[in-house]
């Protein structure tokens, strides 16, 4: 929805989970010389300022990427988290945070293709500016200022049928869960070899919608003409039934965690992300006690 702006949330704990998972998938795709296609359905502006007054107002980066960096020297680091920090630190050192389009851009090669879809006019302009500043791979990047799911339907199946769909809507409306499920099920039918990675929030007021969405995705993946495997991981900051008293009523109605649902997960993604989730839970939960 056009009211959503990721500048309020960049680098939060949900971004940490999402981008750790994304980087593992990108790394797996890049291990082979065969080209691949990436479709990012809700791209955002690609790079965010950690000094943005909107992000400072919410303080969400403090409980995400900044919390992770504060504690990282005290712990053994899983390889996935190490990869995440390797890609993010050049931006962090400039008080910035790299979103999914920038992480995807770093992995694409001459014969790979990246489609970035963003409807919000301000985010679209910033996305164009950020991609324009890295023109060495710009010919492989296609930016679409259009509706995410309509454009996804038009782009699938791509000519290069090895690849990834990353979907992380804002879920501001309860119907977004059903719309996401229907769009991903349709994409899976049209492009059954694609890795489909769906991010979703864990919300106290949306448990039914979340369960219905993930159940529909699982059924679609495991049945039909091309049954395949799935993987799901969730990172919670605290028990949904024990919301910290320090949280405002508005925040308490929002995320207590987030998850990733993957259709056609790459080999070893489950073991690497299970290790990553346990590590992140041990560090990021410290702010919620």
Image (cartoon, rainbow, N blue to C red):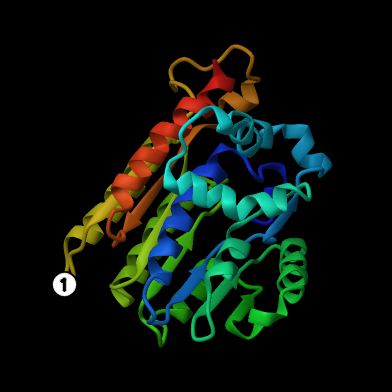
Number of residues whose C-alpha sits closer than 10 Å to that of mark 1, classed few (under 14), some (14–19) or many (20 or more): few
Q: Nearer the viewer, residue 121 or 38?
A: 38
Q: Residue at x 81, y 44 (%)?
A: 52
Q: Residue at x 16, y 72 (%)?
A: 225
- Is residue 147 visible to the viewer in this orientation of the structure? no
Q: What residue would you read off at disc 1?
A: 225
Q: Nearer the viewer, residue 20 or 125?
A: 20
In the picture, which quadrant includes the C terminus? top right
Instruction: Please state the horizontal and vertical placement of residue 9, each as a whole percent of the image.
Output: 66, 42
Q: Residue furthest top?
A: 245
Q: Is residue 8 above or below residue 42?
A: above
Instruction: Please state the horizontal and vertical placement of residue 37, each as a whole percent of the image.
Output: 45, 77
Q: Residue at x 58, y 83 (%)?
A: 140
Instruction: Please state the horizontal and vertical placement of residue 61, each as a whole percent of the image.
Output: 67, 37
Q: Residue at x 59, y 55 (%)?
A: 87
Of helix, strand and loop, which one carries label 1?
Answer: loop
In the picture, which quadrant includes the N terminus? bottom right
Left of 229 or right of it: where is 122? Answer: right
């Amino acid at each position: 929805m056009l009211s959503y702006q990721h500048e309020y949330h960049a680098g939060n704990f949900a971004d940490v989970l999402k981008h750790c998972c994304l980087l593992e998938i990108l790394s797996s795709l890049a291990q082979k010389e065969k080209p691949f296609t990436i479709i990012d359905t809700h791209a955002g502006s690609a790079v965010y300022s950690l000094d943005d007054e909107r992000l400072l107002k919410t303080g969400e980066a403090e409980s995400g990427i900044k919390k992770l960096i504060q504690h990282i020297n005290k712990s053994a680091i899983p390889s996935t988290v190490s990869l995440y920090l390797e890609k993010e630190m050049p931006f962090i050192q400039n008080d910035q945070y790299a979103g999914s389009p920038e992480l995807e851009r770093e992995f694409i090669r001459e014969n790979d293709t990246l489609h970035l879809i963003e409807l919000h006019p301000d985010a679209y302009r910033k996305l164009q500016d950020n991609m324009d500043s890295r023109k060495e791979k710009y010919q492989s990047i296609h930016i679409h200022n259009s509706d995410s799911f309509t454009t996804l339907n038009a782009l699938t199946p791509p000519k290069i049928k090895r690849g990834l769909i990353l979907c992380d809507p804002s879920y501001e409306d309860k119907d977004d869960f059903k719309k996401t499920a229907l769009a991903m099920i349709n994409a899976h039918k049209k492009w059954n070899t694609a890795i489909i990675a769906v991010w979703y929030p864990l919300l106290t007021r949306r448990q039914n919608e979340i369960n219905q969405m993930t159940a529909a995705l699982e059924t679609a993946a495991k049945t039909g003409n091309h049954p395949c495997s799935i993987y799901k991981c969730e990172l919670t900051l605290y028990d949904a039934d024990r919301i910290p008293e320090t949280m405002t009523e508005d925040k308490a109605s929002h995320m207590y965690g987030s998850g990733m649902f993957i259709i056609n997960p790459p080999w070893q993604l489950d073991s690497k992300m299970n290790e990553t989730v346990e590590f992140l839970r041990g560090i990021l939960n410290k702010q919620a006690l």
